[in-house]
Amino acid sequence: MKAVFISYNQAFKEEILDIMLKAGVKGFTNWEEVTGRGSQTGEPHLGDHAWPTLNSAMLCMVEDRIATDFMKRLKTLDENNPLMGLRAFSWSVDGTF
């Protein structure tokens, strides 16, 4: 099983939920308003007067068999909208109950 953490511009929420549906990802935890700044490119999303945009974040536990497809779909969304801001990270989960 993989944990997939996604930090994304709030405007991407519907697209990400659609990607989840198409990839077969059901469960998630979502944080509606988070702030941050990417380490590579893009503008800060700080929710203040200078940088008013906000991010959201999501954590999904995904079966190994669909994790690669899910990550590819997220990467395509980011590549098609490079100025919006989306990052996804995955790592192995040792166990769940």
Image (tube, helix red, strand yellow):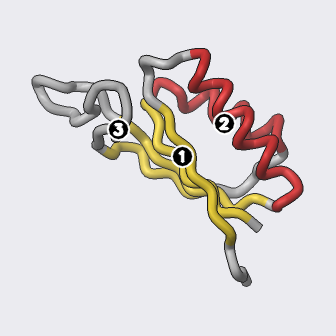
* Residue 97 percent across, percent down from the top left: 73, 83
> In the shown orientation, is residue 56 left or right of residue 50?
right
Check disc 2 and report the residue beneath it: 17
Q: Measuring 63% from the left and 24% from the top, which residue is drawn there?
A: 77
- Going from N to C along the chain, the mark reached first, 2 or 1, is 1
Q: Quadrant of residue 16?
A: top right
Query: Which residue has dot 1 on it?
Result: 6
x%, y% of residue 93?
Answer: 68, 73
Amino acid bearing label 2? Leu
- Residue 68 in percent (x, y) is at 79, 47
Q: CA distance from mark 3 to mark 2?
A: 22 Å
**Disc nearest the viewer among 2 and 1:** 1
Pointer 3 residue: 38
In the picture, measured across the screen, residue 36 lies left or right of residue 72, that is left
Q: Position of residue 50 (x, y in %)?
A: 12, 23
Residue at the spot x=63%, y=26% of the render?
15
How far apart marks 1 and 3 lie (CA) works out to 12 Å
Q: Are marks 3 and 2 in contact (CB under 8 Å)?
A: no
Compared to residue 77, the image places residue 1 above or below, namely below
How many neighbours does mark 3 have within 10 angstroms: few (below 14), some (14-19), or many (20 or more)?
few
